[in-house]
Image (cartoon, rainbow, N blue to C red):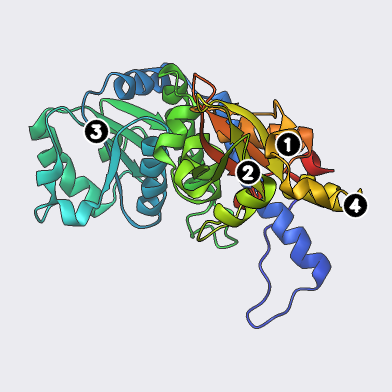
Amino acid sequence: MSSNAAPAVGGVLSPFEQLRYAQDILRTEAQALDDLSRHLDAQFCRAVELIYYCSGSVIVSGMGKAGLVGQKIAATLSSTGTRSHYLHPAEAIHGDLGRVHHEDLVLMLSQSGETEEVVRLLPPLSSFGIPLIAITGNRNSSLGRAADVTLELGPVREACALGLAPTTSTTAMLALGDALALVVSRMRRFRPEDFARFHPGGSLGRKLSRVDDLMRPLAECRVARRQQSVRQVLVDLSRPGRRSGAVMVVDDQDRLVGIFTDSDLARLFERRREEAIDCEIGSVMTPTPAVISSGVSIHEAISQLARRKISELPVVDGFGRPVGLIDVTDLVGLIPEEETE
């Protein structure tokens, strides 16, 4: 049987006891989430409807640990297609209520529903005449009674051995906020492209970008006419900055007809064909190379590079003219290990 017995003051838990206590904590919180999922009702659907049809912003508020959870919920709403920001209850009654607009709605978090700063905020919010959704442990609390929609967590047992530190309750609030955000996001038909628009930074943003965002623009690429000699191309087409191991070869209409890479140059020497250095590059290039169209997702480019085991991928417009080049060295960390094996 699970037990949340805490170690004596100054005591030390053995590794076995540490793991058992941690498992008890996780089971307690997991059980609370399972119970919460079984008790969702029409109030949840009403909350989803209010958020979905809100023409302003969802203002999330809460005090203490509930406020920290509220900040995360506001961030999740914002990143999944619902305008949202966090409002600190104490700051709100000292001027920040000016952030509230008549088209907004408020999502208020308080386990007890009696938090002083939250309760003081209820009358001013009521004067705005905007919807109030409450996430609280008791629908009969001051917050629960004031709300238009109350999502009741019910009695939860905090995982803290003293039963005091907000743990299980904040986990339940966070999960319920995620459920609201993601249900509404699905109703909005939120797409990967939309997600990318809100996440331009970091590895995640790069993975969701278009090839045009990460390619080397044509001005930084080496482009040659097919009648130019290999020697001429290598001497005349040096570029500052990042060096690509590929030369894109075009015809008189600037359409891509081939590619000449460092690997092609190496093969000439391996086959003792040094004289080919002074031949037309069109005679030793790789004709009709793999390409990708401008506007395609970087994920598709990564898949092509991995599948074909190539290092450079020209990006072309609708007329087959190169507009840039994807070089594998610029995508380090974006190709999954399983795709490179």
Q: Residue drawn at (22%, 51%), measured in percent from left and top?
A: 89
**Which numbered dot is residue 57?**
3
The amino acid pointed to by label 1 is Met
Q: Along the polypeptide, which appears first: circle 2 or circle 3?
A: 3
Q: Along the polypeptide, which appears first: circle 4 or circle 2?
A: 2
**Which numbered dot is residue 285?**
1
Compute the Cα span from label 4 to label 3.
Answer: 65 Å
Crowd rating for badge 3 (residues with CA inside 10 Å; few <14, some 14–19, many 20+): many
Nearer to us in this view, 11 or 23:
23
Compute the Cα span from label 2 to label 1.
Answer: 9 Å
Residue 300: x and y in percent read 63, 30
The amino acid pointed to by label 3 is Ser
Compute the Cα span from label 2 to label 3.
Answer: 51 Å
| Foreground disc of the pair 2, 3 | 2
**Which numbered dot is residue 247?**
2
Judging by the rendered image, the residue that carries numbered circle 4 is 270
**Which numbered dot is residue 269?**
none
